[in-house]
Amino acid sequence: MAGKKFRKISKSGTISPQKVNDLPVELIDKIVSYNGGDMASLRASSCISRAWRAGSLPYLFSFALFSSREDFARWRTIHASCPYFLDFVRIVKYEPGARTQDEELKRVAKSLSDIAHYGALVNAITNPPNYSPHPPGINISCMPRARKLLWDTLLSYGVSVTPETRQFISSFPAIQELHFSGLFSSISDGIEFLSLFKNLQKLELDDLAFERGILPPPFQYSGDMSVLRDFSIKDCRMPADWIVDKVFAVSPPKNLRRITCESGEFSFSPEAFVRLLDLAADSLEKLAFTPPISAIAEPDWLHLPPFARQPDQVEEITKGGFFNWDHLAETVSRLYPELKEFVFRVSMEYNFGEEIKIALEKGLRKLLLGMGEKLIIDWYDENATNVDSASDSESDLY
């Protein structure tokens, strides 16, 4: 072995700075990706060398938050000095007042009485100073590779489609995922807002409300839902039939694979829900829904109107709420003989241990005997902690 030289490893096991700089680009990217959510680490790695800077920048600028006029001005400055940085943005969040809320919360005096302190906190959250749900009139340059838009506004301020709103959204022409949470001024404004997106593959509406209903004349939907694959609506504060009748009926979601409908007091009417399933009959694969828990609404959901078309491609149905499960299992097995999974989700406020879980699962499988191996019982602990459990040795896993 004479004549061969071996690299000496330091006693600490670390590699010299020169070796760190000489790492392959692929390995640098892999290392940097592990710190994707740690801005301090990303800033530090961007200062090591040119190669590390090139690997860190796409993660440093992958997320753009617009909360104040200063954020808009900041991105204008970034574009003016380093225009290619805008190509790194993948996720955009519009949350007006978020920074102001944080500042107000810090200013709330802890010396106040409990009641006064609580009132001040609530006011800081619900009524931040100079709040507006609409983007300011500050144009930003195009972020051509942004794929996801998170739009989160306060429920006490109605969103309408202003020229500034149109200008802001036009800066993200490739948005494929939209998550909206907030209050629209009217249903017509909601329809017009959704019309601004032409290539949505995923649409999530969460905690949705309206100040008024459809205003005459109602806005005619002009977007495109033909490539939509995933639709989710949760905690809608008003009936959501308009989405089916004014949006999906105009532009049918021909490729819709997954529907998630979880609502409390309000949701689709049974008739609108069936119309939605009819529209997605050729492509629907997974359906998860929780009917409103209401003495008035529940009987209507027990007797759904007949389907115009049978969704033959459905492989998975998850149903929440109260129901005659045995009858549902029998009906589902008959209508969907190719069904692969029937998910029974059990939500727990307290982890009561494996023995009780096993006993409950045994009872469920006996009641839903016709499901056989298709039945999947999914336990969900709402308040998972290491101490909030029964005496079982494995209970801390749930």
Image: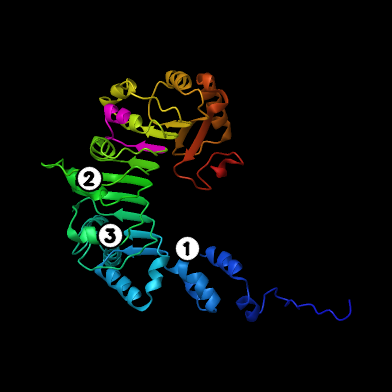
Q: Which picture quadrant has residue 295?
A: top left
Is residue 118 in the magenta section?
no
Residue corresponding to mark 1: 37
Q: Residue at x 52, y 19 (%)?
A: 370
Q: Residue at x 50, y 44 (%)?
A: 388
Dot 1: element: loop
Dot 2: element: helix
Q: In the rendered structure, which disc, 2 or 3, sits on the residue that comes first in sequence?
A: 3
Q: Position of residue 396 (x, y in %)?
A: 56, 44
Residues drawn in magenta:
258-275
**Residue type pointed to by label 2:** Ile
Mark 3 or 1: the one toward you: 3
Residue 293 visible in image: no
Is residue 264 in the magenta section?
yes
Q: In the rendered structure, which disc, 3 or 1, sits on the residue that comes first in sequence?
A: 1
Q: Is residue 186 above or below residue 284?
A: below
Q: 203 left or right of 131? A: right
Numbered badge on residue 170: 3
Mark 3, residues whose alpha carbon is within 10 Å: few (<14), some, or many (≥20)? Answer: some
Mark 2 or 3: the one toward you: 3
**Residue type pointed to by label 3:** Ser
Which one is nearer the viewer's eye here, 282 or 329? 282
Residue corresponding to mark 2: 191
Q: Position of residue 195 (x, y in %)?
A: 25, 48
Numbered badge on residue 15: none
